[in-house]
Amino acid sequence: MDRRAFLRTMRILEARYPMKDWTTGMRPFEVLISTVLSQSTTAANERRGLEDLRHRVGTITPERLADTSEEEIARAIWHAGLARRKAPRIRAIATAIRDEWGGQVERILALPTRRAREELMALPGVGPKTADVVLAMAGGHPTFPVDTHIARIARRWGLSRRKDYESIRRALEDWTPPGKRKEWHLAIIAHGRTLCKARNPRCPECPVRKDCDWYRRTRVRKQRPDTRKRGASTKG
């Protein structure tokens, strides 16, 4: 897929999947904790874990989570999966935000994008994907977070020869206008959940299949005739 095809594809997906901002009404620290909970689980399980955490501690703030035991956090977020691994991270992040940033993730988000990304990634358990999600969704920074759906679709579209996170992110950011990155990030995720699934993608229903490298390759393989004579032995 070349740049022109990518832009054409994204205009179609943008119209097909109107933006649904899951962070509406959330404070930046909640977005950060929600993104940590989303690691290695489904959106539904992440949401349930976040709601249970709210029920347990009340308003989710750095101060409250820093003062809550790891055991109690783990019990609250059980539905989000990997609770024993995520609970220490969440408490450590809350403590760092409270002690180093005055309890305000907004102070990080007010920094220039590159510096803000570095500071977020310096927090315990925060990698590039989590940092980019918080930057884009809570801070309005022009980053293009790459989740499993986006990585899969980027490979199918042939946007990057390399499969690592940073290569895919750079390829998407190079071809996406800064003001469209958040919206197109959400559109590709919606497309991955709806049609371009990991298993059994619904290609006949896909509105952008004509520009999809993966679709063209698989269609050619399916249409390639069998050159062997019918009934001939395949043994030497």
Image (cartoon, rainbow, N blue to C red):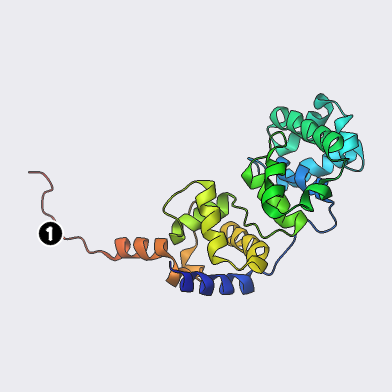
Structural crowding at the residue carrying mark 1, measured as other residues with C-alpha within 10 Å and reported as few (<14), some (14–19) or many (≥20) = few
Looking at the image, which is closer to me, 236 or 190?
Answer: 190
What residue would you read off at disc 1? 229
Picture coordinates of residue 196 (x, y %)?
Answer: 52, 59
Q: Quadrant of the C terminus?
A: top left
Question: What residue lies at 49% left-to-right and 46% top-to-bottom?
Answer: 164
Query: Looking at the picture, which amino acid does disc 1 mark?
Result: Lys
Q: Is residue 115 above or below residue 57?
A: below
Q: Quadrant of the N terminus?
A: bottom left
Residue 93 occupies quadrant: top right
Picture coordinates of residue 172 (x, y %)?
Answer: 54, 60
How many numbered tags mark residues here?
A: 1
Extreme-left residue of the structure: 236
Is 157 placed left or right of 113 in the picture?
left
Does residue 135 show up? yes
Is 224 placed left or right of 154 in the picture?
left
Looking at the image, which is closer to me, 8 or 206?
Answer: 8
Extreme-right residue of the structure: 58
Question: What residue lies at 60% left-to-right and 50% top-to-bottom?
Answer: 147
Picture coordinates of residue 170 (x, y %)?
Answer: 54, 56
Question: What residue lies at 14% left-to-right and 59% top-to-bottom?
Answer: 230
Is 186 placed left or right of 79 in the picture?
left
Question: What residue lies at 86% left-to-right and 38% top-to-bottom?
Answer: 62
Is 43 placed left or right of 196 in the picture?
right
Does residue 207 show up? no
